[in-house]
Structure formats: C-alpha cells, structure tokens
C-alpha cells in the first residue's frame, strides 16, 4: 500500500510539473501573439495616418488646380 501511494504521488508530481511547463509555454505564446497584435495595430494606424495625409494632399492639389484653371480662364482675351 505504501509503495502504491508513493508511486501515485510521484506520478502526480510529474503531471503537475508537465502541466506547469505547458502553462509557461502557453503564456510565452500569448505574449508573442500580443506583441504581434500590437505591431500590426501600430502598422494599421500608421498606414491610416499616411492615407489620410495623402488624401488631404490630393484634395489640396485638386483645389489648387481648379483655382488656377479658373484664374487662367479669366486671363484669356474676350472673343467678340
């Protein structure tokens, strides 16, 4: 009986050790995934910022071109 209890305790200790190692590996994987998610989120926000900046710049070019074209029309001589 004593031998069976000792063996069972050893098996339980080994199972707990294995479970603890698995938990640590899972936490490490979770940390890696969290870091990757933060990186992708930062890249997304940066690309959104660049896209918004470019769209504002494009709108400014269109306004300037339209304004210049309108002023150019005022400079053309009047046809009788």
Image: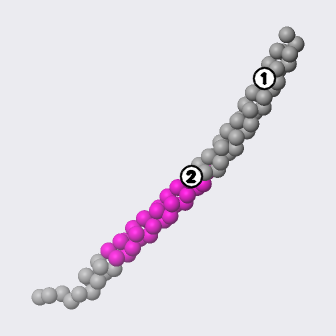
Q: Which mark is residue 52?
A: none
Toward the viewer: 79 or 72? 72
Whether 57 is among the magenta residues is yes
Q: Is residue 27 visible?
A: no
Q: Is residue 61 visible?
A: yes
Q: Position of residue 41 (x, y in %)?
A: 56, 52
Highlighted range, magenta:
38-66
Q: Position of residue 39 (x, y in %)?
A: 60, 54
Tell me the SS state at disc 1. Answer: helix
Eye-nearest disc, 2 or 1: 1
Residue found at the very far top of the displayed protein: 1
Q: Which residue is under mark 2?
A: 41
Tell me the SS state at disc 2. Answer: helix
Position of the C terminus, as image quadrant, is bottom left
Is disc 1 surrounded by few (<14), some (14 to 19) or many (20+) residues within 10 Å?
few
**Tag 2 near tag 1, CB within 8 Å:** no
Q: Position of residue 28 (x, y in %)?
A: 70, 44
x 49%, y 58%: residue: 48
**In the rendered image, the vertical position of residue 50 relative to residue 10, given as above or below:** below
Q: Quadrant of residue 9?
A: top right
Q: Main secondary structure of the magenta part?
A: helix
Q: Position of residue 73 (x, y in %)?
A: 25, 82
Q: In the picture provided, is 52 more to the left or to the right than 16?
A: left
Toward the viewer: 59 or 2? 2
Q: Which residue is under mark 1?
A: 12
């Amino acid at each position: 009986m004593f031998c069976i209890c000792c063996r069972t305790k050893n098996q339980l200790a080994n199972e707990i050790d294995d479970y603890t190692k698995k938990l640590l590996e899972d936490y490490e994987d979770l940390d890696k995934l969290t870091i990757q998610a933060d990186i992708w989120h930062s890249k997304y926000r940066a690309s959104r910022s660049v896209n918004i900046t470019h769209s504002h710049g494009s709108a400014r070019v269109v306004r300037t071109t339209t304004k210049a074209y309108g002023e150019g029309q005022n400079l053309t001589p009047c046809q009788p």
